[in-house]
Image (spheres, rainbow, N blue to C red):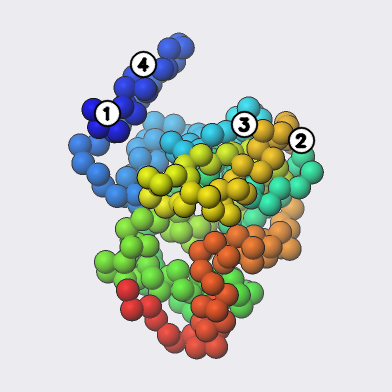
Amino acid sequence: MSLTNEVRKIIDNSINWECDVFKLYREENLGLRVAVSQSITWFFENEDAGIILEDDCLPSSAFFKYADTLLKKHYSDHKIFHISGNNLRPTNDHSYHLSKYPRVWGWATWKRAWKSYDDSDDFISQLTKKQIKKMFPRAIDRAFWSIIIDKMKLPNGTLKRRSWAYFWALNIRSQQGYAIQPEQNLIHNVGFSLDSTNTKADSRLERLSSKNTAAASEITVIDYPSYQEEKDNDFVDNILIESRMSYFKIIVKIIFPFLKPRH
């Protein structure tokens, strides 16, 4: 039996409580970007709001009440596009804040927000230098995302085939939108193994993904979250850049912004 069929068997046999189950099974592997994004689009053809959990995201019990409460609270707030569940640099605070960067290891959103999702070539090609500067005023952030965007423009690039999440982050930023970010880590990513497609076993990300998850307690609902730039800067400096590319590449991009990736 293939791994795909084993997973389908688990779904068919393990959901034994009273509920309506809708399934979208594919006959072929569409690749990460297309498969995930189209599945979410299909999901929102049936629901106005909901939680998205990939197979390797193990949520804490606090995550569900947190997501459900904030989905209802910010249903009509078009400034907020995304509710993140994971935090790789958690604090002891039981609250949450606004961030420019949606984390996708366990999250929630609304149909009205997902309508903005666009992974077309036109969307990427129409991001001008002026617009990117508005989206990411800090030079380091702008250099990181300029490298990502350059790679996404490559016709047969690996990043373009795999990453729906970068498109989603850029969609949100292009509209000056925000994600809600919990101060605690509510999701443990268990997808780090030798068979993993996009993660590496025994890596720094694996160690961070399990940090404080089990101890995460109920999140306190506040009147309205504030944007905290210093935490976004910390996320970029210590997670995005350190995990995805070296500072050397960032500095080179800042000094020579005209350089483009070859593959």
Which of the marked residues, 3 or 4, is nearer the chain's N terminus?
4
* Residue denoted by label 3: 60
Q: Is residue 134 left or right of residue 11?
A: right
Q: Report crowding for label 3: few under 14, some 14 to 19, many 20 or more residues within 10 A (C-alpha).
A: some
Q: Can the viewer see residue 70?
A: no
- The answer for how far apart the CA atoms under marks 3 and 4 are is 23 Å
* Residue denoted by label 1: 5
* Residue denoted by label 2: 220
For badge 4, the amino acid type reads Asn
2 vs 4, front mark: 4
Which of the marked residues, 2 or 4, is nearer the chain's N terminus?
4
Disc 3 element: loop
- The answer for how far apart the CA atoms under marks 2 and 4 are is 35 Å
Dot 1 and dot 3 residues touching (CB under 8 Å): no
* Residue denoted by label 4: 13
Quarter holding residue 176: bottom right
- The answer for how far apart the CA atoms under marks 4 and 1 are is 12 Å
Quick one: 18 or 123, which is closer to the camera? 18
